[in-house]
Image (cartoon, rainbow, N blue to C red):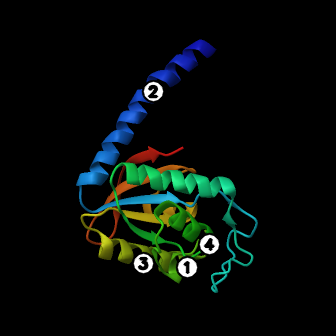
Amino acid sequence: MRKRIAMLIVAMLPCTALADDSLWSRLQTDENLVVLMRHTQAGGGHPLAWDESGRCKGELVLTTKGKAHARSIGKAFASHGIAPVVISSPMCRCLQTAHEAFQSAPLTDPDLREVASADGERARAHETKALSLIAANRGKAPIVFVSHRPNIDQLTMELITDGELLVGQANERGEIEVLGKIAVP
């Protein structure tokens, strides 16, 4: 039984690599693409805390592993010759992920903070701002949107894990049609 499972897993690996290659190719050539990514590994604070001063007081911040993972994601983009437009939540773990990966200051807005699932007003504000920024920045260069798991779920109805990049195509309203996922270890 274990042998069959192992064979099945090995058989699926080339399909995943081909899917990843196809999506990377589309990111190089297609217009109006968006990559939604969750911040990398963070710890040390409260998930909903936000220090507007930018000093990260009480916030989750990237771990050493999270910083290294963000750099790996940035290297994957660079190795494919992709220089994206970067949009990020203003919370420290997202800003740190964006900086470690892309070495530039992302576009951001207070409405892009992590949304608690029971906060309908903030959820609507997040969705409105996110769609607006995506619509305004879509074009030849893909957008990388660094955010939080519940926020990405709200925009796409897709859950992603650490290291997964959710690739989609944005329409003129900023709404995203999901094309697939890329795994970056």
Amino acid type indicated by mark 4? Cys
Q: Position of residue 179 (x, y in %)?
A: 34, 49
**Residue at the spot x=76%, y=65% of the render?**
44
Q: Secondary structure at mark 4?
A: helix
**Residue at the spot x=26%, y=71% of the render?**
172
Few, some or many C-alpha atoms within 10 Å of disc 4 (few <14, some 14-19, many ≥20)? many
Q: Position of residue 23 (x, y in %)?
A: 33, 46
Residue tagged 4: 92
The numbered disc on residue 128 is 3
Task: Write down the quadrant of residue 60 in the picture.
Answer: bottom right
Q: CA distance from mark 3 to mark 2?
A: 38 Å
Tell me if residue 56 can be seen: yes
Amino acid type indicated by mark 2? Met
The answer to which of marks 3 and 2 sits earlier in the sequence is 2
Few, some or many C-alpha atoms within 10 Å of disc 1 (few <14, some 14-19, many ≥20)? some
Residue tagged 2: 12
Residue tagged 1: 122
Q: CA distance from mark 3 to mark 4?
A: 22 Å
Q: Is residue 59 above or below residue 53?
A: above
- The residue most toward the bottom is 53
Q: Is residue 110 above or below residue 171?
A: below
The answer to which of marks 4 and 1 sits earlier in the sequence is 4
In this view, the mark in front (2 or 1): 2
